[in-house]
Amino acid sequence: MENQEIFSMLATYDHEQIVFCNDNATGLKAIIAIHNTVLGPGLGGTRIWNYKNDAEAIYDVMRLSRGMTYKAAISGLNLGGAKAVIIGDATKIKTEALMRKFGRFVENLNGKYITAEDVNTTTRDMEYVQMETSHVVGLPESMGGGGDPSPVTAYGVYMGMKASAKNVFGTDSLAGKKIAVQGIGKVGGHLLEFLHKEGAELIIADINETVLKHYAETMGAKVVAGDEIYSQEVDIFAPCALGAILNDANIAKLKCAVIAGAANNQLAEEEIHGPLLIQKGITYAPDFLINAGGLINVYQEHIGYNRETAYRKAEHIYDVTQEILKVSADEKIHTQKAAINLAEKRIQDIAKVRATY
Ligand code: NAD
C-alpha cells in the first residue's frame, strides 16, 4: 500500500491518528486507530486477527474505530472513538510479553487512547496490558473493573427492543410477542432472560447444541436450525451472533416487524439495506445504538465504576431509540442514517462548546 493511499483513507474517514506498533522481540505488530477525540479520549477494544495482509488490517481498524466514535457519541458519553488490532493468529502469537509490550505502546499515547478487550482478547490479557498502562478498561471486578459487560449490553438491547415495539405495536410490553434470537452467547443468553421474564414466546438458533438444549428446557424456547431463523414468522428478530446478516438474500426471507439485536454491523451495506428494510416495512433499531451497553459499562469503569449507574445509563437507550425512529419517519431517512446524523450532530455541537476557553 502506497503511503499516499493511507493518507487518503485517513482523509476519507476523517481520522486523527494512526499508530503502527512494531516490536521484533515479542513479535508484536499492532495498529491503533484514533478516529475522533472531540468528545473525549478514544476508547475501543483490541482485536487480534490473522489478516490476509496489512491493507486489510488497516481498513478494519479504521472502520471499527469510526464505529466507536458514533457509538460513544450517540450514547451521550464523553468519549471519542478508537480501536486497535494486533496482527496474527491469537492461538500462536499471544504471550504475556506481547500483551505487555502492546500496553507500553498504549501508555505512550498518554491517555488519548484507552483500550479494552475485543475479539480474541480476554480479561486476562487486559490484566497484562494493565501492568504497563493505566489506560485500559474491561478489567475483572476483583481488580476494580466492571467485569463482563455482556449483561449491560443485553439490557440496552432489551431497552432498544421495547422502544421499537412501542413504536410499531403501540405498546412496549413484550408479553406474548414472538421473538427470534440468533446467537445465544454472552449477550443473547442474558437477553433471553429478560424476554422470558416478560412472557415472550422465544425461537432460537445457534451452532452450539448444548446451549440450545439448555434454553429449550428452561424457557420452552423453540429451536430452529441455522438459517431457518431468518424466515420465522415473528414480531421481532434479534440478531446476536454475526455481522452483515442483513443482506439481500436474508432480507428477502424476513417475516418480522422489528429487528433489534446486539450484533455489530448488521447491515451488509448501510445505504442499500437500510432503505430496503424500510421498503419491506421492517423497523430496524440501529445496532451501534442499542448494543452500546457494553461501552457504557466500560466508560463507567473509566470514571469510577458503579454498576447501578451503568444500568441507568443503558436504560436511556430506550429514549434515544424512540427519538431515532421519530427522526427517521419525519425526515424519511433510514434509521441507521438517522442515528449517525444524531451522533455527528452531538460531536459538532460539543466541538463548538470547546471552541472557547
Ligand atoms: P458470543 O461469542 O458470546 O456469542 C455469539 C453466539 O453466536 C455463540 O453462542 C455462537 O455459537 C453463536 N453463533 C456463531 N455463529 C452462528 C451462526 N452462524 N448462527 C447462529 N449462531 C451462531 O458473543 P457475544 O459477546 O454474545 O456477542 C454477540 C454479538 O454482539 C457479537 O456480534 C458482538 O460483536 C456483539 N456485541 C457484544 C457486546 C458484548 O458486550 N459482549 C457488546 C456489543 C456488541
Image (tube, helix red, strand yellow):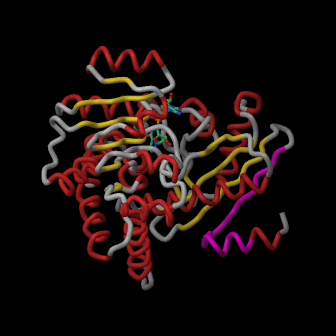
The answer to whether any part of residue 267 appears in the image is: yes
Give the position of the C terminus as an image quadrant: bottom left
The answer to whether any part of residue 297 appears in the image is: no
Q: Is residue 57 above or below residue 191?
A: below
Across and down, in percent, residue 87 comes to: 74, 44
- Is residue 11 part of the magenta span, yes or no? yes
Number of on-image labels:
0
Across and down, in percent, residue 77 comes to: 38, 60
- Left or right relative to 154: residue 130: right
Where is residue 337, by image quadrant?
bottom left
At a point 26% along the width and 20% down the height, the residue shown is 220
Across and down, in percent, residue 36 comes to: 54, 67
Given residues 8 and 281, the one toward you in this image is 281
What residue span does the magenta drawing correspond to? 7-23
- Left or right relative to 230: residue 268: right
Give the position of the N terminus as an image quadrant: bottom right
Given residues 220 and 104, the one toward you in this image is 220
Across and down, in percent, residue 187 comes to: 40, 35
Where is residue 12, by image quadrant?
bottom right
At a point 70% along the width and 44% down the height, the residue shown is 86
At a point 38% along the width and 44% down the height, the residue shown is 261
Report the residue that reaches farthest toward the front: 252
Q: Is residue 23 above or below residue 354?
A: above
At a point 78% along the width and 46% down the height, the residue shown is 52
Where is residue 98, by image quadrant?
top right
Given residues 71 and 349, the one toward you in this image is 71
Q: Is residue 323 above or below residue 352?
A: above
